[in-house]
Amino acid sequence: MDNGELLLISIGLAMDAFAVSLCKGLSFGKVNVVNSIVVGLYFGIFQALMPSIGYFLGDFFAPVVVQVDHWITFILLTLIGTNMLKESNEEDKKMNSSICLKAMLLPAIATSIDAMAVGITFAFLEVNLIKSVCFIGITSFILSTIGSLLGSKIGMNNKVLALRFGGVVLIMMGTKILIEHLIFL
């Protein structure tokens, strides 16, 4: 696999993390570079960790993971998207701007499940695992940090619209992943 293919895979894997980071940035209220970097680190680390896990699971769990990864991704992204839609209707309530492990774990896992499936496919290909996971992790870190910064730049003035848009996008992404898997069985 050449660098161009790896970059395209990395960008594709990072898109859902970018969308969630954009929405997380909305909660900051003002541009906060440190928080945006921390958000980027969560997504970058999980996006690198999951293909590593997938790679090592390879043959052993491939039939099981491949059969349910789309359902897990669909459910998690739909839950996160639905929660964002719910938060958009609670205008008085302050959005959760926490970047602690408890607040970031579910979104980081939800957006990196597809990366684990990619890691499983890496196990069957001649892929330099260290180079691949570094590429994926760094790309996700950069795009998630940018997404968080953009979200904080958009600011609280556009919170309701951005939350609704982000929630719908996440639900649509989860649905798209599910439909693709069901159609191309």
Image (tube, rainbow, N blue to C red):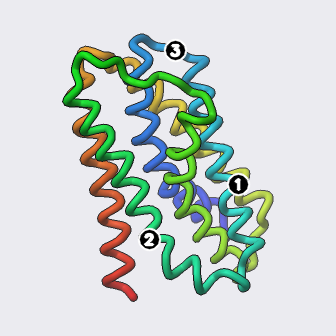
Q: Residues within 10 Å of mark 1 (few under 14, many from 20)?
A: many
Q: Secondary structure at mark 2?
A: helix
Left or right for 88, reference 28: left
Between marks 1 and 2, how big is the CA–CA gap? 18 Å
Between marks 1 and 3, how big is the CA–CA gap? 26 Å
Say whether disc 3 or disc 2 marks the residue closer to the N-terminus.
3
The residue sitting at 73% across, 51% down in the picture is 134
Q: Secondary structure at mark 1?
A: helix
The residue sitting at 52% across, 37% down in the picture is 144
Residue type, mark 3 in image: Asn
> x, y percentage for residue 171?
30, 54
Residue type, mark 1 in image: Leu
Residue identifier under label 2: 70
Residue identifier under label 3: 32
What is the quadrant of the N terminus in the image?
Answer: bottom right
**Of 32 and 89, the residue lying toward us:** 89
Left or right for 10, reference 169: right
Image position of 92 with respect to 118: above or below: above
Between marks 3 and 2, how big is the CA–CA gap? 34 Å
> x, y percentage for residue 91?
22, 20
Residue identifier under label 1: 49
Say whether disc 1 or disc 3 marks the residue closer to the N-terminus.
3
Residue type, mark 2 in image: His
Please tell me in which quadrant of the rendered image residue 42 appears: top right
